[in-house]
Image (cartoon, helix red, strand yellow):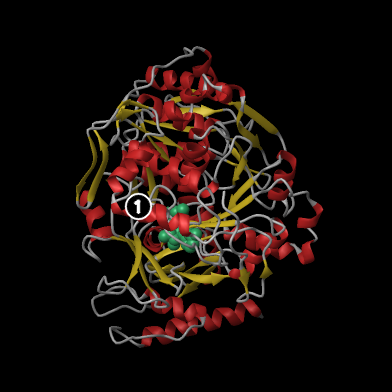
Amino acid sequence: MSSPSKLYENSEVGGGTMKISVRTGKRLEKISKEALAEPDKFWADQARNLIWFKEWNHILEWNSPFARWFVGGTLNASVNCLDRHINTDTKNKAAIIWESESGETRTLSYFQLYRQVNKFANVLKSLGVSKGDRVTIYMPMVPEMPIAMLACARIGAIHSVVFSGFSAQALIDRANDAKSKVIITADGGIRKGRLVELKKVVDESLPSLPSVEHVIVLERAGNKVNTGPKDLWWHELMEGAKIYCPPEPVESTHPLYILYTSGTTGKPKGVMHGTGGYLTHLYSTAKWVFDFTNQDIFFCTADIGWVTGHSYIVYAPLMHGITEIMYEGAPDFPKPNRYWAIVEKHGATILYTTPTALRMYMKYDDDGVVSNSFDLSSLRLLGTVGEPINPKVWMWYFKRIGNENCPIVDTWWQTETGGTMLSMCTGIETIPMKPGSATFPVPGVDAVVVDETGKPVEPGTKGYIVIRKPWPGMFLSLWGNDEKYRQTYWTKFPGLYYAGDYALVDEEGYLWLLGRADDVLKVAGHRLGTMELESAFVSHKAIAEAAVTGKPDETKGESIIAFLVPKEGFSDYENLRKEVVAHIRSTLGPIAVPNEVYFVSKLPKTRSGKIMRRLLKSISSGDKIGDITTLEDEAAIDEVRQAYEDLKKMVNS
Ligand code: WTA
């Protein structure tokens, strides 16, 4: 090891000198250069870290815009997460330390997890689930959720997890698009001390789900639920299940899962990930970014309903054989200190969380009152994901939580990219950090910032982040919709992957993410599409038209704000507002509930009939209204502004 060459000083945020030793970035530069000179060879070397039944014939078939990695190779994801450890010292190590909101703890060793996964794989098989079938998983954050996912992977079935904060309509859209054969759920989940009635949502959805043959129900919350002819109890099925299920060798390009995510069109998109490429990307990026060691206790606070949980609770940590913490519950229940209490209790060494959670905690941490009351000295590394992090919050995280001893990895990536794309790689070298910058692309990822014409921009100029070369974690396509895949991601800049984020590069080459460039919202780190929300609003009988936009929110990053045009004859706005909010809660789910709802008689549209959400956003954020030359009817702006002002007054009075 060479000696540290530099300590980083950050004057921009008044940060002072950090205690961490950092290096110049030369090592990263060298590896990245080599990787991009021969990306195929580079990624093939990485793929050799996995367990393969058969090695590939071709590293990459790039039929733009479709990438197929390690073609001809066969493997199994559950073997890579479990079987690979059970003849090693990792066998008896804790794989998952689970903690509930009430403080109850369960620990599963790698062997126990392996056993459960094998048994549940046999359960699925006995129900007629086979390779390529889709299984929807709609569960609370309990160990049975990764067990179900890995059991699917073991038999080559494709899992499709639906976040438990979604309700019936969201579940129906997702399970129908995937034509799932089985739904796995629970009698309930617990959030903020309250019961989340997942089974009830499944019951409501079932009449609209013709493909579903069975519903497997986990007893979790002691909640009495109705049982219908398709329902089966998890524990009863497991009782008689055989303990070993031979893993299905699947092609590297075989879909491991579908995860629905929001885009700019009404229906959610089924992002489909393969097996060999995805796992290779995850294995390597996890090692580079987090530098996992045998002693680590990794605490990723994401919900498995989102991609961060798929990649960094299920697949990456288990492939590396480390111990991880899985927490079911809210970060602020019963008190706004749960993550710190968990770090202290279990001795977490790495914390990977969202700026939203950090902003919330920072609010309660007057002069370190909360953070100082816990022993957080086990931490050696901190991470963030999901949204841009404000430099002020970054500094608080660095000082109060990391005690200036822990580097921060700000990881930028997306459901579509599978794994981290931009981040400092502490497993390669810790470089000078800049609060709010995701630093550089990970090795083998060719990310640049371009202008409207697709040309790289000068340093300091805002542009769009694009990826120029295929990467192994890249999704295969959108489930059942290659055309939409092509159109959404590959037409704005032909030949370049369009991520939908604004970014800039500074003079030293550091990348800064500047938020979404499209109509996707990031509410408390959750990705929501304005169009999906609008469809849900107009599915209410009193609403003729809806426009949804995001408004900056101090804690959640963004909050949902809706402008609604009621149908003729509806004028009791106060009641209607309540009704509409309840409707959103029961159709899309609690996470989609708007913060503000306004009623207007018309919406600002372009002459071609498109709603000008940008304009609504400017009005609600109090920003300057930009170019309105394409607007059809200027009176609509005044009306929206008036409705907004009136309501503000009402709320304030
Ligand atoms: C945003 C989450 C800034 C971004 C893993 C991206 C970020 C979207 C960061 C994907 C970050 C994610 N800094 N913005 N470190 N990480 N984003 O699919 O807008 O839920 O396009 O995946 O989150 O959200 P998704």
Horizontal side, residue 595 vs residue 640: left or right: right
- How many marks the image carries: the answer is 1
Residue with the most extreme front position: 2
Front residue of 324/161: it is 324
Tell me what residue is drawn at x 21 percent, y 63 percent. 494
Q: Residue 523: percent from the left, percent from the top?
A: 51, 61
Pick the quarter of the image with the C terminus. bottom right
> Which residue is denoted by mark 1 in the rendering?
34
- Could you say which quadrant of the image residue 624 lies in? bottom left
- The residue type indicated by label 1 comes to Glu
What secondary structure is found at the residue carrying circle 1?
helix
- Establish if 560 lies above or below 585: below
- Could you say which quadrant of the image residue 174 lies in? top left
Front residue of 543/190: it is 190
Tell me what residue is drawn at x 31 percent, y 71 percent. 456
- Establish if 307 lies above or below 108: below
User: Does residue 373 appear in the picture of this structure?
Assistant: yes
- Could you say which quadrant of the image residue 131 lies in? top left
Q: Residue 422: percent from the left, percent from the top?
A: 44, 57
